[in-house]
Image (spheres, rainbow, N blue to C red):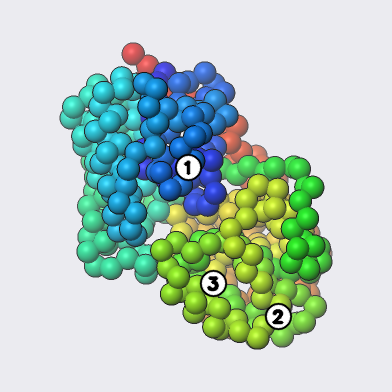
Amino acid sequence: MKIAYIGQKGIPMTQGGVEAHVENLAVEMAKKGHDIFVYTRPYYTNKKIKEYKGVKLISLLKLISLPSIQTKHLDAISHTFFASVHALFQGYDIIHYHAVGPAIFSFIPRLFSKAKIIGTFHCIDRFHQKWGRFAQTILRIGEWAICTFPHLTITVSPHIQKYCLKEYKKETLFIPNGFKIDDNFEDDILKKYNLVSKKYFIAVSRIIKHKGLHYLIEAFKKLNNPEYKLVIVGDTFYNQKYKNYLDEISKGEKNIIFTGLQTGESLDKLFTNAFSFILPSEDEGFSITLLEAMAHGIPVIASIIDANMYFIEKSVVYSFENRNIDDLKAKMEYVLSHPEENDKISKKAEKYVKENFSWDYIGNKIDKLYLSYKK
């Protein structure tokens, strides 16, 4: 089948949960014999890349890397409009939209093409603090659109599935995110940042306010344990002001390290050698980095929010009260002093995530879904 993905910034993934999801899904579908096309944005994917692991980034000898207005508010929406119009003339069997903002334009191929339209609802974005009132309104419209125009809507977590039913009376199909680990550990990232294996906490996310990294920094400072470091992995996302704020509250703290964006072997080695992974987010869709941390067999400390309850209720992660610095500090101290419990919960989490969230498992589910629409 000829299938297009619209909404992601592009692949190969450098950062972004949607991008990681699309890359892994696209590669899995290409392995299964589908003709996969991924729409990319010019600043994200090198225009010279015409194919990636069997996934086509070209169409009719032209790069699918279409223009966008590269600002926080207009980037996704402008690129998706161009991609949606372009898709009308490519003879796709399925056009799969990712994220609520891009789904606003899913009505275009729904009305003017014969393709089956699928939308994946990744996150309730309008609750994120980075968006102003106008952007929140647009994202609200996007939620309605992804629950209205596609022939089928997929949700990546139970709490988003419940949200769609409550807010839009929409029955959706729950198919979670997956994880993937690169087992090649030849990178010297630990030496670069003077890190000792199992002597640092790690957080991996975009540097944006709703990810709650300021709570983590304050909790770590109160921990006052010079034997351990805090490693924050990720880059800014149209939000240098927040990064400047994090730099300010970390000033003079030699054990707080910002590595910037890390991918591939470097990121895998940072995960593997971490003592514990911390997810302090105020809001999430379904965190891929949380899955990756559990798959690496390290204890996870996650904020008590709807998106994380799926794992908290199964007792495969530790938890702390959302936005509560003292509670997060207390849980970090607890993990430091309970090695046997850490080992038990980590092994349980690793087993659970590998059995239920591998891309092989998820890819088979999506493949059956696509084939159900085969003409």
Label 2 sits on what residue type?
Answer: Lys
Q: Which residue sits at x=42%, y=68%?
A: 239
Residue 229: quadrant of the picture: bottom right
Residue 243 is left or right of residue 172, and the answer is right
- How far apart are the two marked residues, 1 and 2, measured between alpha carbons? 35 Å
The kind of residue tagged 3 is: Leu
Give the spatial CA distance, label 1 vs label 3: 28 Å
Judge left or right: residue 255 versus residue 313.
right
Q: Is residue 52 above or below residue 260?
A: above
Label 3 vs label 2: CA separation?
Answer: 17 Å
Farthest-out residue, top:
375
Query: Could you tell me residue 311's position as x and y percent?
Result: 57, 56
99 left or right of 360 in image: left
> How would you rate the neighbour count of disc 2 (Cα within 10 Å): few for under 14, some for 14-19, many for 20 or more?
few
Label 3: which residue? 213
| Residue 225 horizontal/vertical position (percent) | 75, 82
Determine whether 331 is above or below 165 in the image: below
Left or right relative to 257: residue 74 = left
Q: Which residue is disc 2 drawn over? A: 254
What residue does disc 1 label?
45
Is tag 1's residue or tag 2's residue first in the polypeptide sequence? 1
Q: In the rendered structure, which disc, 3 or 2, sits on the residue that comes first in sequence?
A: 3
